[in-house]
Image (cartoon, coloured by chain):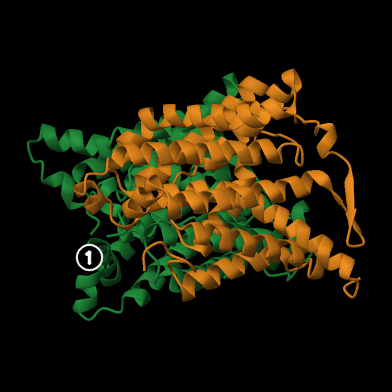
């Protein structure tokens, strides 16, 4: 089960303070980066919920985000729904699709689960890519931003939108914590440790897996609605399997199954991407080498490494294990 | 159109050609998985590397040396990868392995861009393989027939090696139960190494023969990866029959889907994969019963 250690709370406070300070002082380009980080962070929180706490390594989350983005854009432009209900509708759509895919894939394990989610992701990608209803490879433009002028916030201003994205990131994080602490979240972690044992205890395993996948889909859908509002344009590229792969990389870089770690990873990843891209076009080489190094070091990402160091420093080695699952704990056993 | 027998023969050959290309790629990947339980996502990147080496060698000394140099060069890269990364990741979980090879995809994508640039390269087919052959009332490019023949030859050769030779028996024993095979005195580590390098070499060969058909670009490895994974998952990880069955299913569904139901074609194969995973999660011909 997820626990808030002092280190996790300190990291969150530090991240929040840094984001607010940066958001108040940054220029246009900095605000765009901040928004990008917030959107990616919501997506990787959703992914960590299923991959880190449920052992379901999904390559479907890029598609879930894309479904949220397309759902929002279609509802708001073609169906003429107001932006707020359109956001809620798109998140619900992400949840329903996530539940269905989770329910179908729940029978498979390990590498087969990864392949099954990959297949569904590619199915969604190809369908949207070829369908004229979804604009094909041209995508759809004209996604409106939410109107919060009643609260005195202008979302068409990049500063206003960055803080809006940050607020939703906080909400998504708190929702994920609440879900993981609920009975459902505990059952999911129980399944991760031993599916057989949970089944013997009378738990309906596939239903739990489908439920957590669906809830994760709601959050991924939220990230999608934000992405659509941010660039005001959606393209099939949002659903490509490399988006899911990149999200997985961010989760691993940050620290699988720590919830805080992936947020750190998202900030690190986006900042690094912009820094490296400014100097060289070979950004993929850098991220590839970093990924190999992180996985081979056997540390659980940046944040997992930090937690292990702090735990050792405190002389309480068992503390690292309570809320923190090593990479190896994720096998298809 | 569909009442013309020539149409069916032509599309059948197209499907067979795609199948054979995929077979060369998937057989290495699937036997590596069956033996080592290792999913090498960088297999597609090795295929792209093979295509690049072939393009360079072909430009310098001609097509036939390129066809030999590409598999050898990629097998050599396989040796380096095995010593540097794969050996150390053997005991790690599947998740770590997937991620390391995912990192390799990224790294190799940019390395090929650094070495060969961003431009698409092409290869000229030698005189004897260029042009078209006329038979059964149709005309068909000779080079594509060559691919079909090469793929068929590889299938027959691998079947004979696996079923009739001592090393084939050792590999089958290793796929079945590697610990027991080790207890019986088989050097399983050495077997892994050989299979891994041969698998890499086959990926390089696939790249070299695909290069004249498709243009050689840095992302060709990424494009072929998903079809290859679909093939081995439909066929069942670890088995030769699975690789050939999966390749044929993919080739025919994709080719005939594209001409008979273009709107559905791309979704069709993924739907098929999803159906296989739900009904027979271990694939159609799993290596272990």
Residue at which label 1 appears: A194
Q: Is residue B67 above or below residue B40?
A: above
Image position of B143 (left or right of A206): right
Q: Quadrant of the C terminus of chain A?
A: bottom left
Q: In which quarter of the image is residue A28?
A: top right
Mark 1 Cα within 10 Å, few/some/many (few <14, many 20+)? few
> Residue A6 or A273: which is nearer the viewer?
A273
> Residue A110 or B233: which is nearer the viewer?
B233
Image position of B208 (left or right of A255): right
Residue located farthest toward the left when viewing the structure as drawn: A315
Can you tell which chain is drawn green? A
Q: Position of residue B43 (x, y in %)?
A: 52, 41
Counting the numbered discs, the total is 1
Q: Position of residue B49 (x, y in %)?
A: 60, 31
Residue B128 visible in the displayed image: yes
Residue at screen point 69% across, 66% down: B253
Residue at screen point 60% across, 43% down: B222
Q: Is residue B102 above or below residue A3?
A: above
Residue A241 visible in the displayed image: no
Q: In which quarter of the image is the N terminus of chain A?
A: bottom left
Q: Where is residue A4 in the image (x, y as percent from the top left)?
A: 23, 51
Chain for disc number 1: A
Can you tell which chain is drawn orange? B
Image position of A16 (left or right of B160): left
Q: Where is residue B187 in the image (x, y as percent from the top left)?
A: 27, 40
SS type, badge 1: loop
């Amino acid at each position: 089960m997820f626990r808030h250690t002092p280190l996790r709370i300190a990291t969150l406070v530090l991240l929040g303070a840094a984001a607010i300070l940066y958001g108040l002082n940054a220029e246009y380009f900095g605000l765009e980066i901040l928004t990008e980080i917030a959107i990616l962070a919501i997506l990787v929180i959703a992914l960590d919920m299923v991959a880190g706490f449920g052992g379901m390594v999904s390559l479907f989350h890029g598609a879930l985000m894309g479904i949220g983005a397309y759902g929002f854009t279609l509802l708001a432009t073609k169906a003429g729904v107001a932006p707020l209900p359109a956001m809620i509708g798109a998140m619900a759509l992400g949840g329903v699709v996530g539940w269905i895919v989770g329910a179908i894939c729940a029978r498979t394990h390990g590498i087969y689960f990864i392949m099954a989610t990959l297949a569904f992701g590619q199915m969604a990608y190809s369908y949207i890519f070829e369908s004229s209803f979804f604009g094909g490879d041209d995508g759809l433009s004209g996604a409106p931003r939410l109107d919060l002028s009643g609260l005195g916030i202008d979302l068409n201003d990049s500063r206003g939108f960055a803080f809006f994205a940050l607020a939703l990131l906080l909400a998504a994080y708190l929702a994920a914590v609440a879900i993981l602490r609920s009975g459902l979240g505990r059952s999911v972690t129980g399944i991760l440790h031993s599916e057989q044992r949970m089944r013997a205890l009378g738990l309906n395993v596939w239903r739990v897996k489908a439920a957590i996948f669906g809830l994760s889909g709601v959050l991924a859908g939220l990230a999608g609605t934000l992405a659509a509002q941010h660039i005001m344009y959606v393209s099939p590229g949002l659903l490509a399997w490399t988006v899911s792969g990149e999200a997985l990389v961010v989760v691993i870089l940050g620290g699988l199954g720590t919830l805080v770690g992936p947020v750190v990873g998202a900030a690190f990843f986006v900042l690094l991407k912009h820094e490296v891209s400014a100097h060289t076009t070979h950004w993929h080489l850098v991220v590839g080498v970093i990924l190999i190094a992180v996985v081979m070091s056997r540390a659980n990402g940046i944040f997992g490494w930090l937690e292990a160091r702090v735990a050792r420093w405190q002389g309480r080695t068992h503390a690292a294990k309570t809320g923190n699952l090593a990479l190896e704990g994720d096998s298809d056993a | 159109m569909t009442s013309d027998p020539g149409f069916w023969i032509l599309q059948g050959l197209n499907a067979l050609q795609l199948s054979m290309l995929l077979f060369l790629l998937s057989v290495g990947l699937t036997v590596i998985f069956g033996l080592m339980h290792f999913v090498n996502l960088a297999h597609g990147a090795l295929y792209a590397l093979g295509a690049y080496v072939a393009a360079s060698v072909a430009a310098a000394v001609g097509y036939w040396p390129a066809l030999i140099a590409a598999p050898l060069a990629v097998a050599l890269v396989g040796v380096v990868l095995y010593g540097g990364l794969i050996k150390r990741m053997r005991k790690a979980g599947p998740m770590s392995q997937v991620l390391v090879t995912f990192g390799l995809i990224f790294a190799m994508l940019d390395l090929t861009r650094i070495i060969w640039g961003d431009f698409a390269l092409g290869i000229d087919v030698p005189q004897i393989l260029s042009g078209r052959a006329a038979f059964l009332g149709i005309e068909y490019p000779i080079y594509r027939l060559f691919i079909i023949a090469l793929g068929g030859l590889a299938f027959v050769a691998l079947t004979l090696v696996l079923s009739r030779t001592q090393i084939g028996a050792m590999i089958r024993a290793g796929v079945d139960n590697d610990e027991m095979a080790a207890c019986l005195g088989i050097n399983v580590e050495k077997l892994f190494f050989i299979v891994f390098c041969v698998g890499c070499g086959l990926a390089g060969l696939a790249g070299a023969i695909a290069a004249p058909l498709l243009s050689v670009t840095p992302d060709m490895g990424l494009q072929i990866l998903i079809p290859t994974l679909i093939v081995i998952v439909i066929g069942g990880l670890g088995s030769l029959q699975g690789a050939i069955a999966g390749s044929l299913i993919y080739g025919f569904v994709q080719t005939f889907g594209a001409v008979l139901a273009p709107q559905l074609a791309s979704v069709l194969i993924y739907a098929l994969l999803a159906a296989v995973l739900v009904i027979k999660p271990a694939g159609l011909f799993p290596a272990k019963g």
